[in-house]
Amino acid sequence: MSKPLVVSIPHRLGRAEALRRLQAGLTDAQAKFGQFFRIDEQAWTDNRLQFRVSALAQTVSGSIDVRDDHVRLEVVLPWLLAKLAETIQPLIRKEGTLLLEKK
């Protein structure tokens, strides 16, 4: 099994607002891009999301931890997607930052 992809995204929103934006952003992403992926499992426990997503015949599992000053995403990628991790990581960081920027 490959090592997990970990992305940490700093923010200044506080935990509650970051959590609200993430939950809304995940709902929007599923509505906009649902034809490309399927959420198989999604379970929030306090400020932690455990998830499993299927896309392109691949399954990805991971967690998102929402903290007071950052969000930490940890994803276990199948070997094929793990080969693309260096390409995926900046994209995840960019999209996460856009979601968490003050508006």
Image (cartoon, rainbow, N blue to C red):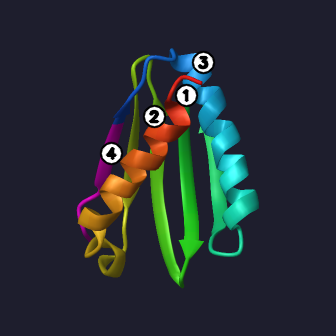
Residue of label 2: 65
Indicate whether residue 5 is drawn in magenta: yes
SS for tag 1?
Answer: loop
User: Badge 4: how crowded within 10 Å, few (<14), some, or many (20+)?
Assistant: some
Q: Nearer the viewer, residue 69 or 94?
A: 94
Does residue 46 appear in this view?
Answer: no
Q: Is residue 67 above or below residue 36?
A: above
Q: Nearer the viewer, residue 44 or 95?
A: 95
Cβ atoms under marks 2 and 3 closer than 8 Å: no
Residue of label 4: 7
Residue ID at (44%, 17%): 12
Q: CA distance from mark 1 to mark 2?
A: 6 Å
Residue ID at (65%, 63%): 39
Residue of label 3: 16
Look at label 3 and name its amino acid. Ala
Q: CA distance from mark 4 to mark 2?
A: 11 Å
- Quarter of the rendering containing residue 30: bottom right
Look at label 4 and name its amino acid. Val
Q: Is residue 97 above or below residue 89?
A: above
Residue ID at (72%, 61%): 32
